[in-house]
Amino acid sequence: MAQMDDRELATQLFNRCWDLLGTTRDADDDVELMTAAFSSRFHWLNAGAVEQWIVSDWMVARAAAAIGEGELALRFAKRAHSAAQENEIPDWLIASSAEGVARAYAAIGDVEEFNNWSALATRLIDVIADPEDQALIASQLADIESP
């Protein structure tokens, strides 16, 4: 029963992150965004598997980048990408993890690393088998403001 509760909470909190990322936020909303991202991550650590752990690290990175916390974004994006490299996971998640690192470097303002990771993410997106997954990750990469 507790595992089901963790899964439900993790999912609801993850979806709350997307809601907040899609709006104009104030400082309180930014705090809620980070709280939701870390809380979702906590619950996925209890109830998920490696894919959910990677996605939850990616979401923490995404949220941190959105509020201008580039170093925190980079820390979690690199965690997600390392785990993606070390485990058998879907092709879209490998590409997504590289997109996350590119986004983190953009948040820091490191143009050279952003360009390197953006190019890697593009190569990984190009080999995603499912066209819908490919389009989704490509749209997320295209959404990053170049530093």
Image (cartoon, rainbow, N blue to C red):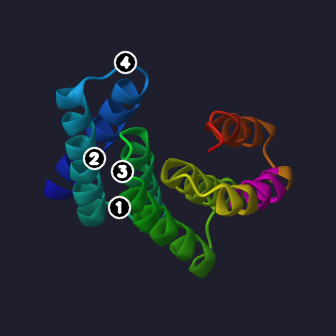
Mark 3 near mark 1, Cβ–Cβ under 8 Å?
no
Three-letter amino acid code of the residue under disc 1: Gly
Q: Which percent across, then down, holds residue 59? A: 41, 49
Callout 2: SS: helix
Three-letter amino acid code of the residue under disc 2: Ala
Q: Nearer the viewer, mark 3 or mark 4?
A: 3
Of the numbered discs in the image, which one, if any, rests on residue 69? 3
Q: Is residue 31 above or below residue 98?
A: above
Mark 2 near mark 1, Cβ–Cβ under 8 Å?
yes
Tell me if 96 is positioned left or right of 115 in this view. Answer: left
Q: Nearer the viewer, residue 100 or 96?
A: 100
Disc 2 versus disc 1: distance between alpha carbons? 9 Å
Chain-order first, disc 2 or disc 1 = 2
Taking the magenta stretch, the answer to whether it contains residue 112 is no
Disc 3 versus disc 1: distance between alpha carbons? 26 Å
Look at the magenta stretch and give its main secondary structure.
helix
Q: In which quadrant of the rendered view does residue 94 lie? A: bottom right
Residue found at x 36% / y 52%: 60
Three-letter amino acid code of the residue under disc 4: Thr
Of the numbered discs in the image, which one, if any, rests on residue 88? none
Chain-order first, disc 3 or disc 4 = 4
Q: Which percent across, then down, holds residue 30? A: 26, 34
Residue linked to disc 4 = 24
